[in-house]
Amino acid sequence: MSDPNEPTQGEKGEEEIPLGQRIFDNPFLLLIACIVVMFVFYTGWGLVELAMLPEAPLP
Amino acid sequence: MSASMRTCPTTGLKVDSTADALIKVNAVVATVALLIGGVAGLLVLLTRWQAVHLLDVVWFYRLLTIHGMNMLIFFILFFEMAVLYFASAVLLNARVPAPKVGWAAFGLMVLGTGIVEWTMFAGKADVLFTSYVPLRAEPPYYLGIILFAVGALIVVGHFFAILVVAKREQSYTGSVPLVTFGAVTAAVIAAVTLLHGALVYIPTWLWSMGLMEIDPEFYRLIWWGLGHSSQQINVAAMVAIWYLLGAFTVGGIVLNEKISRTAFVLYIGFISMASAHHLLVDPGFGPSWKVWNTSYFMYMAVLASMIHGFTVPAGLEAGQRLRGVTQGLFGWLRRAPWSDPGFSSLVFSLVIFGFVGGITGVTFGTEQINIIAHNTLRIPGHFHATVVAGTALAFMGVTYYVIPLIFRREVAFFKMARVQPYFFAGGMFVFSIAMTFAGTFGVPRRHWDVTFAQAPFQVQFSPAVDLVIGVMAVGGLIGILGGAMYIVITVWSVFFGRRLAPDESGLGAERLGLPLGIVSPPKPLPAGADESMLARHPLGHVPGTMVLVLVFLVAFVVYYFVNWKLLSDVWSVG
């Protein structure tokens, strides 16, 4: 349990920081993950869907 | 300590003078945008209330555009810029590495805002918030938005720079605090959002000058990567503020850092693609894309919200039980500081966001059900519960702490401040519910005249619609009154409120003007306090929260399946 305004994990000693915490502590890794997921599944896939749409025949 | 830093006598935090100033100016501009958007909202409401039907058609759409841009973009994002500076420079005791960049970014945002306001009021951009192509505004409108977005993107970059400087200069050790981690989440989502803004508004600006063509479906896809994701920045910032207000007001704790941080990471990974539920009835996208983005992935973000929806109240309950408030299931709620506007805002924001905004959002984001909700008043009913009663109310609650801690002023009209969240939350709760009900009857959103009086065809809604829209209007007026109270209190406090002396902590102050969390902060927990000190109850260590969560889940299931029943009535089989 901790106070949400205080730095918390990893400050108490020299013990090795777990991998998950190291990932979470790297904002640039999180930024890249967010960009990749969004641009692959929403934006990129959506653009491919639009590019593959057949042209509507004129009435 | 740098000469440009002061030490807050209340919290002991070191506050960089540039961060201090940038928090203030962003908060002030946010409040101006709230005022403009609020007045526009009042006039739009008095038009949608068919018994009054105040505005003509041109001014209805003009003011609806102004309302949307000011509330969903300018108010929210300026406030979030203040949150980013607070959560980085202030909470980490760090300096702002590039003050001139910070001021240049703020200047760009203000310039962009000014241009957009001018084009909207001058009738050069009657295109609504979404500005769907081929609706065409005049080029300065798009240019203004681009300038604003560039400024905001620079602030996001500046936020990351502050994190780097803070770590390098060891102004903190270990991991950043959870509140800062929430702000990191908001900043990451903001970066993705603003990239989509650049992708869509630059070509649209060129299109508005006749320099290129733009495909409407391309516009909708990319625009919603901006339009909806921008509201997800709100969600992350709002949750961070929930944790902050919980700690300030009742000494709320974080039950499990890993769980709460994982929930924020789920937002980072998956929340932005909820943008796709605006495109669920668009013919250009296949069901795989729609279902993947709105169900498979969006539910990861829903899971994150439900985690926060449990951990925040559980942290409030555990924090109080550890301090001796152990009576019954809900003694921690009965004895909570309901006269502290920070606490009441937190609880109302959490409850309305979850019970109204969350449940309706997930239900409408289901592909099949979306067909009966899309483009009806159910959609604005949903997002007024999330963005207004959720995010805006959380921002209002934290303002009552920002005024003394950052502006170093007392909160003016404090008796009014105590009841302001009740007016705002109560009004917006009634407004959102009634609006959603009106949408259930098929009443369209964004429509000037739902009687279709001059249309060549007849559309007859249930007679109940008039009553429901009347209730919606009353709720909206009460909510607007609450918003007006907030503006009066904050403007008066910031410009005319009593100044606090540089060394005045507010601790033990007997006069009105400071929230309870400052006058009488929660007692420190005993050394080594943890969940093992909480009495074991059949429902766990936080039984009150467990009961509330079960009520939420039942409401969720009932509303979800009621909507499938409504859908089955539309599509009779056999």
Image (cartoon, rainbow, N blue to C red):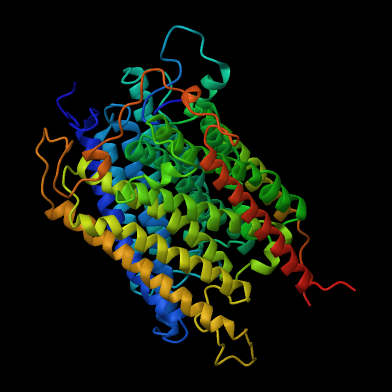
Whole-percent x, y for residue B191 in the image: 47, 41
B171 sits left or right of B199 in the view: left
Whole-percent x, y for residue B371 in the image: 70, 66
Q: Is residue B162 above or below residue B384?
A: above
- Of residue B183 and residue B475, the one placed in the foreground of this image is B475
Number of on-image labels: 0
User: Quarter-wise, where is residue B113 in the image?
Assistant: bottom left
Tell me the quarter of the image containing the N terminus of chain B. Answer: top left
| Residue at 33% over, 23% down | B166
User: Quarter-wise, where is residue B420 in the image?
Assistant: bottom left
Q: Residue furthest front?
A: B327
Tell me the quarter of the image containing the C terminus of chain B. Answer: bottom right
Q: Is residue A59 above or below residue B174?
A: below
- The reply to whether residue B406 is visible in this rendering is no
B267 sits left or right of B276 in the view: left
Whole-percent x, y for residue B360 in the image: 60, 59
- Of residue A58 and residue B243, the one placed in the foreground of this image is B243
- The reply to whether residue B558 is visible in this rendering is yes
| Residue at 16% over, 35% down | B505
Q: Residue furthest top?
A: A14
- Of residue B108 and residue B431, the one placed in the foreground of this image is B431
B115 sits left or right of B288 in the view: left
- Of residue B284 and residue A26, the one placed in the foreground of this image is A26
Whole-percent x, y for residue B515 in the image: 25, 45
